[in-house]
Image: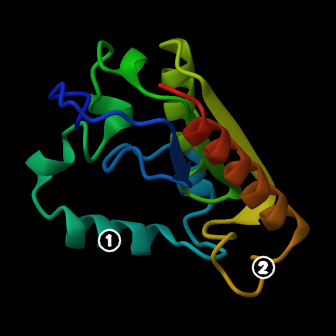
Amino acid sequence: MALERSLPAEFAHIVLFYPITDTHKKLESYEIFKDGPFLKADTLNWMIDAFIPEEKDRQTAQASPLSFLSDDVLPRFPPTSLILSAVDPLLDEGLAFSRRLQKAGVDAAVIRAEGQMHAFVLLKAIRDSPTARAIMDLTTLRLRTALASPP
């Protein structure tokens, strides 16, 4: 939103964990993982209906940047880290959004956590797994580096 409105906000780095990047387009992983194992398509649809009830509000860059963020805004994105779960209905839209960022010349790092489900770095049962710890270490390092560097 700050980029679209040319606000004086400056971001050193953005980290997106398993993001929803499109509220209406359902890509292949949405169908493959519609029944979970953790995040189900019905739950995602319920959340979209609850948080963005109006269809017109879903068709915006804020709600669906994959489809509605304009090509002239994308190159102004700061460096971005996208953490994606391989077993997640949101996997394909995260990959598609990362490709849009990279095509626009953004320093967009994509980390696909194989064998992991949505929210794996938050869930108590698996957040201490080697994969979750490694991803949090890498994310922390990227943020520290970005915040320590002058703009």
Pointer 2 local density, CA inside 10 Å: few below 14, some 14–19, many at least 20: some
C-beta proximity under 8 Å, tags 2 and 1: no
- Residue at the spot 84% in from the left edge and 58% down from the top edge: 134
Q: State left or right for residue 53 relative to residue 105.
A: left
Task: Please say if 19 is above or below 92.
Answer: below
Mark 2 or 1, which is nearer the eye?
Answer: 2
Q: Earlier in the sequence, mark 2 or mark 1?
A: 1
- Residue at the spot 34% in from the left edge and 33% down from the top edge: 10
Residue flagged by tag 2: what amino acid is it? Ile
Q: Indicate how the structure is coloured in the image.
A: rainbow
Residue 47: assigned label: 1
Q: Nearer the viewer, residue 12 or 39?
A: 12
Residue flagged by tag 1: what amino acid is it? Met
x, y percentage for residue 45? 34, 66
Q: State left or right for residue 135 relative to residue 28.
A: right
x, y percentage for residue 102? 56, 19
x, y percentage for residue 75? 41, 15
Task: Please say if 64 is above or below 32.
Answer: above
Find numbered disc 1 in the image and state the secondary structure of the residue it sits on. helix
Find numbered disc 2 in the image and state the secondary structure of the residue it sits on. loop
- How many callouts does the rendering have? 2
Q: Residue furthest right?
A: 130
Q: Nearer the viewer, residue 72 or 142?
A: 142
Give the image quarter of residue 54.
bottom left
CA separation in Å, label 2 and label 1: 24 Å
Quadrant of the drawing holding the N terminus? top left
Pointer 1 local density, CA inside 10 Å: few below 14, some 14–19, many at least 20: few
Q: State left or right for residue 95 relative to residue 77.
A: right
- Residue at the spot 56% in from the left edge and 41% down from the top edge: 147
Q: Nearer the viewer, residue 25 or 75?
A: 75
Residue 126: assigned label: 2
Q: State left or right for residue 135 relative to residue 81.
A: right
